[in-house]
Image (spheres, helix red, strand yellow):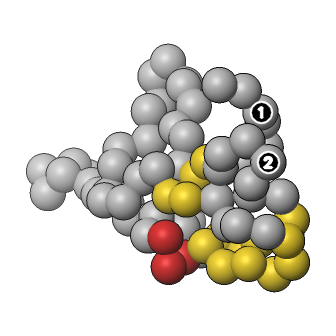
Amino acid sequence: MLDTNVTVTAGNTKPTSQVTTLTAIPESPATALKFISAAVDQGMGTYSISPNFELEIPAHTYVGTGTYTATITVSAVSGP
């Protein structure tokens, strides 16, 4: 997610992007992928984020027809 994809709605300095190129989201075992962060006493407020997602399926994989869904969970956490 590019820094330009994070905009301030209300608040102070916006969080900065930690993932600036297409990066695989870990799937097994499921682990967190930190994609934005802020320094202490920064990043407080309301922000609009517009991440870019891309699904890549190997050419030799048969996926058939139909509808496919995915669930992405976003958590706001604090820590080092």
SS class of the residue under badge 2?
loop
User: Which label is found at residue 41?
Assistant: 2
- On the image, the x and y values in percent for residue 18 come to 46, 50
Q: Vertically, is 36 above or below 28?
A: below
User: Which label is found at residue 70?
Assistant: none
Disc 1 residue type?
Ser
Is residue 68 shown to the viewer in this render? Answer: no
Compared across the picture, whether 38 is left or right of 47 comes to left
User: Foreground: 33 or 4?
Assistant: 4
- On the image, the x and y values in percent for residue 61 come to 21, 49
| Res 77 → quadrant | top right
Which residue is at a point 31% across and 59% down the rendered structure image?
Answer: 21
Q: Vertically, is 38 above or below 51?
A: above
Q: Vertically, is 25 above or below 15?
A: above
Compared across the picture, whether 5 is left or right of 56 comes to right
User: Foreground: 32 or 11?
Assistant: 11
Q: Quadrant of the C terminus?
A: top right
The crowding category of the residue bearing disc 2, from other C-alpha atoms within 10 Å (few below 14, some 14 to 19, many at least 20), is few
